[in-house]
């Protein structure tokens, strides 16, 4: 089974088809004219707004003069993989398609970088914390399913042969807010101790905290975001979300480089990994 999953394989397929077109010095209009298609069809295929049938893929490969090559076999395998059902498809009626697309990218990333100014990252949340957060944003019908998806994301990443490197940078406000205090005073200190335990279990997870003493920083303006890296030439993926937005950008979008620069700037303002864990531990102890 390909560990990259259908979302990443589909993105790789589209990227390589666009590269082949450019190598042949063809525009999308010229491809459409040569194949008797509307230009919008080529745009939808390369943009990921429609799947690629085997017949259409064969037609493109013939036009790009790669139909009988190892490249063609690779692209057919990617297309086959892109059509497989993923574990997150079980949640398609519970969350948006845009969010599930992000989950698909996250599932196959080699590096995950995330900044959170207000809440504990989903990949670090305990069930109790996740339930508290989900309860404030979803109705009862979808509450449990959202929590299940969040916890399953954690589990599936842990089961991967090559675990991704995960770097989380949190504003100190994240560890000071007593989430769940009206329900159970132990929810937040337990959450903080869980984060420390996760970071201490292995070298692949790093948690950094930007202390209040650092003053203002660019993350206060940028807001929460996640940057994903891949080891197969896909490039970086940027995901941003709030209550009204789920946005995933792929490849050469200029915003990705801007956000990467901002992440490094925020990282410079943060405490070292060991000092960050010490601060989180002290915060948990003060909540007793």
Image (cartoon, grey):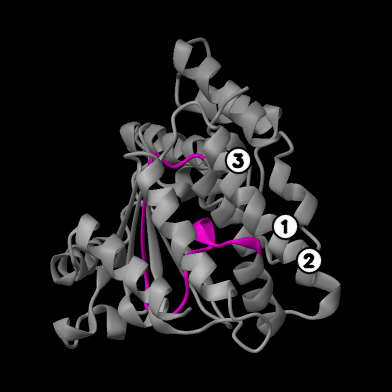
Marks 2 and 1 in Cβ contact (< 8 Å)? yes
Q: Earlier in the sequence, mark 2 or mark 3?
A: 2
Residue holding disc 3? 156
User: SS at mark 3?
Assistant: helix
User: SS at mark 2?
Assistant: helix
Q: Residue at x 40, y 41 (%)?
A: 201
Q: Residue at x 45, y 61 (%)?
A: 193
Residue holding disc 1? 148
Q: Residue at x 55, y 81 (%)?
A: 179
Q: Earlier in the sequence, mark 1 or mark 3?
A: 1
Q: From where the camera sits, is residue 67 visible?
A: yes
Rounded to the nearest angstrom, the CA distance separating label 1 from label 3 is 12 Å
Across the whole image, how many numbered discs are drawn on residues?
Answer: 3
User: SS at mark 1?
Assistant: helix
Of residues 137 and 174, the one drawn nearer to the viewer in this rendering: 174
Residue 144's tag is 2
Quarter occupied by residue 23: top left
Residue 171 in percent (x, y) is at 32, 76
Locate the N terminus by quadrant.
top right
182 drawn magenta: no
The range drawn in magenta is 108-127
């Amino acid at each position: 089974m390909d560990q990259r999953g259908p979302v990443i394989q589909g993105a790789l397929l589209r990227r390589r088809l666009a590269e082949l077109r450019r190598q042949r010095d063809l525009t999308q209009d010229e491809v459409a004219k040569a194949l008797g298609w509307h230009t919008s069809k080529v745009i939808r295929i390369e943009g990921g707004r429609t799947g690629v049938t085997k017949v259409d893929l064969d037609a493109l490969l013939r036009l790009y003069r790669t139909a009988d090559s190892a490249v063609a076999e690779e692209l057919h395998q990617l297309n086959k993989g892109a059509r497989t059902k993923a574990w997150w498809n079980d949640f398609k009626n519970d969350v948006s398609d845009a969010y599930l697309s992000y989950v698909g990218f996250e599932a196959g990333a080699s590096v995950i970088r995330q900044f959170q100014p207000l809440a504990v990252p989903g990949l670090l949340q305990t069930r109790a914390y996740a339930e508290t957060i989900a309860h404030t944003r979803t109705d009862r019908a979808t509450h449990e399913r959202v929590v299940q998806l969040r916890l399953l994301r954690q589990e599936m990443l842990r089961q991967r042969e090559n675990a991704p490197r995960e770097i989380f940078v949190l504003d100190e406000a994240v560890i000071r807010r007593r989430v769940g205090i009206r329900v159970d005073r132990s929810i937040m200190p337990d959450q903080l101790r869980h984060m420390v335990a996760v970071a201490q279990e292995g070298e692949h997870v790093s948690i950094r905290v930007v202390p209040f003493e650092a003053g203002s920083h660019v993350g206060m303006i940028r807001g929460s975001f996640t940057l994903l890296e891949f080891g197969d030439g896909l490039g970086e993926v940027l995901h941003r979300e709030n209550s009204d937005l789920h946005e995933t950008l792929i490849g050469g979008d200029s915003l990705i480089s801007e956000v990467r620069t901002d992440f490094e700037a925020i990282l410079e303002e943060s405490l070292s990994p060991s000092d960050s864990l010490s601060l989180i531990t002290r915060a948990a102890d003060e909540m007793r």
